[in-house]
Amino acid sequence: MFKFLRFSQMTDLVFTEKEMVNSLREYIKAEESKLAAVKSWANKLDSLTKTSTSDPEAYLAHPVNAYKLVKRLNTEWSELESLVLQNPSDGFISNMTVHRQYFPDEEDETGAAKALMRLQDTYQLDSEVLAQGKLPGNHARLTVDDCFGMGKTAYNEADYYHAVLWMQQALKQIDAGEETEVTKADILDYLSYSVYQMGDLPRAIELTRRLVAIDSSHQRAGGNLRYFETLLSKQMNEQHQAFEPASEEPIQLGTYTRPRDHLPEREEYEALCRGEGLQMNEARRSHLFCRYQDGQRNPRLLLQPLMEEDEWDSPHIVRYIHFMSEQEINKVKELAKPRLARATVRDPKTGVLTTAQYRVSKSAWLEGEDDPVIARVNQRIEDVTGLTVETAELLQVANYGVGGQYEPHYDFSRKDEPDAFKRLGTGNRVATMLNYMSDVEAGGATVFPDFGGTAVFWYNLFKSGEGDYRTRHAACPVLVGSKWVSNKWIHERGQEFRRPCGLTEVD
């Protein structure tokens, strides 16, 4: 260091020390601010966990709570971890590291957000309805940050329709005075480009101008604005029109139409999920009956026949009341829970089971040897249908959480899918028995209502072995609650004398 100091140098050191003291004060302030932030986190999370742990099933039955739990664990706890890591607390970080492996990841948060959007579309829910939590059960609100997160998820998936809906909702709440770390500039950045992608150039320009007015140094906004104005000017010149600049009035929310997707019967499917659409007239209803079913005097059903109701006439679908007892349902759930994994569908070309975006649920496969209850349920299916279950698939148990669904599909393989069940060697799926093992507060229907403990049965194939295309069905998204079902898919082999061929192809 310096061996001899000039006065001027000493003077500099005085000011250097003063700066160091100021820096020390800033450090203390930062530590206190961090501690206050951690305390605020602890208080908020303590209140949240008291509510969630008092009745976890009821709490998670609400779709907003389910989304916010996944979002908290994936995003907000990571923010808290980063906050603590600024001056690491070994105990907390060690504990955090142990539990972190079980936390949801980015893909899970995206899935939870998309589930809310699926509910929004199917049940025609306004963004504000979801944001305010105005659904059956306890209300749970989405904050500006939550709405912004929903919009970003949609934006990153190139789903600009939902990006607009949720960025507009975030903007609406921030304009209403809700406190948030998200800025209006952040929202306008995503919203303006999403609106452009929806084909609304005038409004994209208006929103981008508002963004530039807030942050004139925003380079992307400046570039976008010039590009949008050039495009619009070209369009206006071609149409011999003039563009009116936007006023300084509050930003108006736009209304846009959801783009059509790959599913041709999407509108019909969603209408049925809302309880609209296809209805049976009185003449047809008059041919639906109730009866006691003893499986053609099956000894196991003679003393306790099952109540059977005609659910639909063409194709013929029947419902069995009290098909499974509450004790049996609980046992099946207990056996299935440790084995639940993302549900799969059989690839029609390869016959291999694989996951698919159109089926969102968790499933497990149970066999008769797993427990006497499974063997008893299998035997009951055989007794009441008269079909052997020796060649049937294992009992599949499926759990549909909030937003869980299975879009319109057939259970049987079509002529262009000859290898779908080839590996099983038991032929096509001749019939389906679907057992409902829970009551869902809202949504989740298989087009007709679901009642816990009941089961529905239908034939997928005519007696000739030809597929019955009228059996196309779907599991609607669960709006509130948790849906449990079990399926037994019965195959052709072994049914030759139990369900012989008819005289025509469609008998």
Image (cartoon, rainbow, N blue to C red):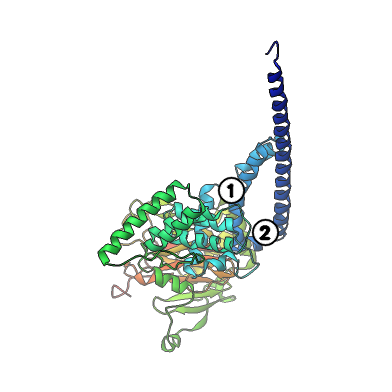
Percent x, y of residue 89 = 71, 36
The picture quadrant where one finds residue 57 is: bottom right
Q: Give the residue at x 46% y 77%.
A: 276
Along the viewing direction, whichever of 483 and 391 lies nearer the viewer: 483
- Is 71 rendered above or below residue 461? above
Query: Number of labelled discs?
Result: 2
Crowding around mark 2 (Cα neighbors within 10 Å: few <14, some 14 to 19, many 20+) is: few
In the shown orientation, is residue 114 left or right of residue 13? left
Count residues near mark 1 (Cα–Cα under 10 Å), then give few for <14, some for 14-19, many for 20+.
some
In the rendered image, is residue 200 in sight?
A: no
372 with respect to 351 (left or right): right
Kind of residue at badge 2: Pro
Which of 54 and 123 lies nearest the eye of the viewer? 123
x then y, percent, for residue 352: 39, 50
Position of 98 with respect to 355 (left or right) is right
Which quadrant would the C terminus be assigned to in this image? bottom left
At a point 49% along the width and 55% down the height, the residue shown is: 213
> Mark 1 belongs to which amino acid?
Thr
Q: Which residue is mark 2?
A: 56
Marks 1 and 2, how far apart in space?
A: 21 Å
Q: Secondary structure at mark 2?
A: helix
Q: Which residue is mark 1?
A: 75
Q: Quadrant of residue 470?
A: bottom left
Which quadrant is home to the N terminus?
A: top right
